[in-house]
Image: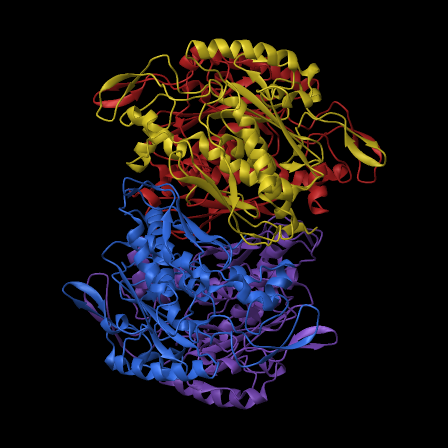
Chain colours: A red, B yellow, C blue, D purple
Amino acid sequence: MPGNSFGRAFRYTSWGESHGPAIGCVVDGVPPKIPLAEADIQQWLDKRRPGQSRFTSQRREPDQVRILSGTFEGLTTGTPVSLLIENVDQRAKDYSEIKELYRPGHADFTYQAKYGIRDYRGGGRASARETAARVAAGAIARKVLGAGVSVRGAMVQMGAHAIARERWSWEATQENPFFCPDPETAAAWEAELDAVRKRGSSVGAIVEIVAEGVPAGLGEPVYDKLDADLAKAMMSINAVKAVEIGDGFAGAAQPGEAAHDEMRMKDGKPVFLTNRAGGTLGGISTGADVVVRFAVKPTSSLLIPQRSVNVRGEEVDVVTKGRHDPCVGMRAVPVGEAMMALVLADHLLRQRAQCGG
Amino acid sequence: MPGNSFGRAFRYTSWGESHGPAIGCVVDGVPPKIPLAEADIQQWLDKRRPGQSRFTSQRREPDQVRILSGTFEGLTTGTPVSLLIENVDQRAKDYSEIKELYRPGHADFTYQAKYGIRDYRGGGRASARETAARVAAGAIARKVLGAGVSVRGAMVQMGAHAIARERWSWEATQENPFFCPDPETAAAWEAELDAVRKRGSSVGAIVEIVAEGVPAGLGEPVYDKLDADLAKAMMSINAVKAVEIGDGFAGAAQPGEAAHDEMRMKDGKPVFLTNRAGGTLGGISTGADVVVRFAVKPTSSLLIPQRSVNVRGEEVDVVTKGRHDPCVGMRAVPVGEAMMALVLADHLLRQRAQCGG
Amino acid sequence: MPGNSFGRAFRYTSWGESHGPAIGCVVDGVPPKIPLAEADIQQWLDKRRPGQSRFTSQRREPDQVRILSGTFEGLTTGTPVSLLIENVDQRAKDYSEIKELYRPGHADFTYQAKYGIRDYRGGGRASARETAARVAAGAIARKVLGAGVSVRGAMVQMGAHAIARERWSWEATQENPFFCPDPETAAAWEAELDAVRKRGSSVGAIVEIVAEGVPAGLGEPVYDKLDADLAKAMMSINAVKAVEIGDGFAGAAQPGEAAHDEMRMKDGKPVFLTNRAGGTLGGISTGADVVVRFAVKPTSSLLIPQRSVNVRGEEVDVVTKGRHDPCVGMRAVPVGEAMMALVLADHLLRQRAQCGG
Amino acid sequence: MPGNSFGRAFRYTSWGESHGPAIGCVVDGVPPKIPLAEADIQQWLDKRRPGQSRFTSQRREPDQVRILSGTFEGLTTGTPVSLLIENVDQRAKDYSEIKELYRPGHADFTYQAKYGIRDYRGGGRASARETAARVAAGAIARKVLGAGVSVRGAMVQMGAHAIARERWSWEATQENPFFCPDPETAAAWEAELDAVRKRGSSVGAIVEIVAEGVPAGLGEPVYDKLDADLAKAMMSINAVKAVEIGDGFAGAAQPGEAAHDEMRMKDGKPVFLTNRAGGTLGGISTGADVVVRFAVKPTSSLLIPQRSVNVRGEEVDVVTKGRHDPCVGMRAVPVGEAMMALVLADHLLRQRAQCGG
């Protein structure tokens, strides 16, 4: 019933607040004898870490992960893997003034409504800092999936400006701060985001995650469909408000004969001629790439004043100074990759349980 | 690990195939002493039932529900409520020719890949017939939510044609076969769908579900957020490929200052001046209407030939005769309502567990 | 959170009251392509059925099971198997007088305290009739375990009179109404139970369940240990008040050097020289027989008057007429077997998920 | 599916190995606004800590707990409480010789069989050191139960020697190293255990846990009965092989008229005249004391040689030097108390979910 765990067979539980001593997670159900060192996890955390360009929060967190259990002589043992990341750069003073405010677009009001108490420092548990635990757990999920499955993400739209898909390059995603697969668009975004930042505003984004090499047969109908679990996984990321698989919303506007993937034989095997379904049919993976997109709303922390109320019922105007990302969407890319890996690893083990190898 | 249950505190398990003797579900965790009779459930099943207009499958199922347990003298007792709906109009012969085919857009190929066997009659477990169990369970969820919460749905786009939101009328949704809230658009859709049906094609749809009266505080961060569970719930419905909350994908294109809901005091209480968030912040309900939209892909069964392969690896062309809906989206409206009610009831009980009344 | 499901990977949900129209269960997670017909289940239900000797309730229930879903052409398909057993011989009038009573040793008082309402007819959901669902689900669990695993049970003590273990014969358990493995003791019990019945009393029992052929490695430390799940499984059976594994309570009185199982090599494999542990170490199966014993309290329904109170707070004397078993222990034998099979099947699939084949 | 979590509504996940850097747990579902400081937890850990008398392992662990999340300004916030206890006195060298041995009565063989790998240092995850996490989580469970519920434990039998129940004194349990409620017996045990220790043997024990003040109505029939969950909880403790509720095994030998608890009115309320049931009927708490007993097998580590085999299939004799408790039963007392508190807290929240306040 409590909500801080994710997955069923490959399951992790996340804990920690933005300004507490540390954050972390416990990953249970890890298959034994998988090589696992801190460096395997650190590489993905480094990708998510703030403070790496002028477009992300200047909070300086090394995000150094420690493995506290579950490995022995470099291998997983099948027991829970406990991961811990210390919070180093909390700067509690930055946040003292939000103690009594409900910031628009933030979770201040709802945490208070739910629990009757909230750790207001840096957003507490609702901070995007929690996503470091997702990325750490996701690194182990990648190990479970093995080298045959690749999970990669890209930012495909910033604000109202989408990439040109014909210029897609996975290599490009590693060469700009936006994980943008289209170098020309990335350059345009850079100028645009500088302007957004300067006027104290923010901007949303659309992120696409692609998993290649996923075997057919993953997903548990009818409620734990692969796409249903992916939708949940992505929608659980901070600031995400929409998720689609394959053609998604656009597919609804197509006539039936242009909305599905026809099949033919190739090298003795059935293949899909297109991938409008995004890699799932009936909630089960088809063997084609699993393709998910999600929308991240613009960062809620703004220098532009916003009308709100405080805990005493007084009307106030809110300006958030602190350290913030003008576009959190870019930092959601490694998080979305992690969630994809976590869902796939979970369903891989679940499939093995019921149907064997 | 198996995937045929939904919910945690208010939890139901669905069973049954399209052409088996019956379908049904077991609803566990129902609070005691709630008045519950078969008629309370039947009214919602009647809304979903096929064969009610020329636009839905002509399968003639009375969908008569029986309560087999969990009530006594008209009240729930707190023990599991078992619901059973007999399959009356199976007509197995209609489907005999699909035995060896993988129909494009259907789950034939993936069920075979997953289980190594499939009940091909009418789609077996992957048939939309399963959604009757959702609607039946959803009827009990409505009872748990009580009269203060209303859950209503509407079809807001058919194919490429959206409604005019300024003409929105909930009453209108009861007066056309599409659950369309805009009477003018409904008339246009009627003509359009006749044409679609005539040329053996099909069309997708976008459905919107709105819950009013939801108290603030529901949702379990950080993985079982209210919107995350709604995303999963809607994406688990047959043929759904996209889900969004509030402004959803469109919200990503707005500047930060136009993307969030400002607050003011009204009658001594904090209120949101807009509802761009769709009723959740940080994954917890705000007290505003919970607004979810989802896309339904065009029906996969077409009279227009589609290229495919069969179980023997031969290339074939597929034409699906049988009985089918040219737009399954309209039948997804009561199903989406049920899933909304189920998620809310579950989170109401979960909230009560951790935080009390 | 609701409590009517059992198991994690192989999971079933039970429903139904003693005097409702039917009882049943939904078994989810069944591996596909297992041959399964109603007769496979019926044979075990027949073993549990009341009315087969003068020592069991004369309620005449055919306990005819129907498979409503999850199989196709004689094989499981991987989708939920729904099982239904109609209640035929309810005789509601027999129970009308207990409507307002709290019968000592029964669940009347606690169901009322918990739910504020209860179906008093024949004990409602608390009736031992529910155990038919366990036996039916257990029959499928046996199929999952395969022919290599045998699960058998015996009654090893009735009241204060234990069997002589040196006379143990599995064949004998099929030849007397007590499932007693010691023919001499069975004869003595027969006379004793007639006397108990005549004076309107009842008697408890100890039941032993043995699983042979269980592979080493099943059980999920540290909370879902195989023995922990077995303890839960057995303690959940009506009227059970104690569970032990291997030497159990008696083992606590042994010196350390006589309390464990030494090992030697045999035919190139490690073997245990004794089985004091009852087949588990550290909560994981050792490959030796899994041996569990549980105590069943004497039937609560007595012709001898018992002091109690009624729902209006009046002091009353209770005499239960109706139809009852003077020793419910004997009917717990097939139920204990079923619970053992269910726990083992669940852990077999769970082991496969994490550790593969 | 993985097994390192316990509870459903009040749920914790434990991690850590005997000789890793630390152990700990994450407690999720904690109600908000409960005062909680490290000292609240430390007091119970101190009670369990080794090295406090000559009868327990001389491992010197301060067992200092740190709260890493979930509290703010001294109150719980409703977010996960992460607890961490560093391992200080690992002395890895003590255990180097068991690397290749399967010690009789230990989990060496089964962890290897299950996972194909094991952390052999000090028993790894199978070490009783894990129980510190249970005690820490149990301390929070006590807070959830509140002052109205008391949970206390006592050792009632050591080896073959039981206490005299007529001398029972809860105060006495605080005055001897055995948590023995009978001072005379405690004195006798002291001499006996010295002898056991001297000859390199060990001895088992029976522990009794009593919860007073438990409201009627807790427990979720039919599988998550209160007593079923207690049986699982206790059986999951290291070295436990038997569990009973109320009269337990002895109750099976009583005639029906002496096996149940009669009721009368007292001060306008129904009361039970005895407590043979141990506080549950039909798996639901009655309001009477919940009384559970469990058997702990003798410590497996002995100076007396035991026959075994090693990982290379060679027959060997095993003598365990290291640091060990001649009677682990006494250290199981605070652990049993913790498990009782954890089960009750979980069911308190579960009851609140379904049935309200």
Q: How many marks?
A: 0
Q: Is residue D116 visible?
A: no
B111 lies left or right of C1: left
Q: Nearer the viewer, residue D328 or B185?
A: B185
A239 lies left or right of A37: right
Q: Residue furthest left?
A: C267
C283 lies left or right of C152: right
Residue D81 on image: x %, y %: 59, 52
Q: Nearer the viewer, residue B310 or C329?
A: C329
Q: Nearer the viewer, residue C192 or B247?
A: C192
Q: Is residue D249 visible?
A: yes
Q: Which residue is at a point 56% across and 12% down the rendered structure image?
A: B189
Q: Which residue is at a point 55% across and 58% down the rendered structure image?
A: D220
Q: Height in image: A272 above or below D140?
A: above
Residue C192 on image: x %, y %: 38, 84
Q: In which image quadrant can residue C61 be found?
A: bottom left
Q: Height in image: D325 above or below B109?
A: below
Q: In which image quadrant can residue D235 be found?
A: bottom left
A126 lies left or right of D8: right
The quadrant the N terminus of chain B occupies is top left
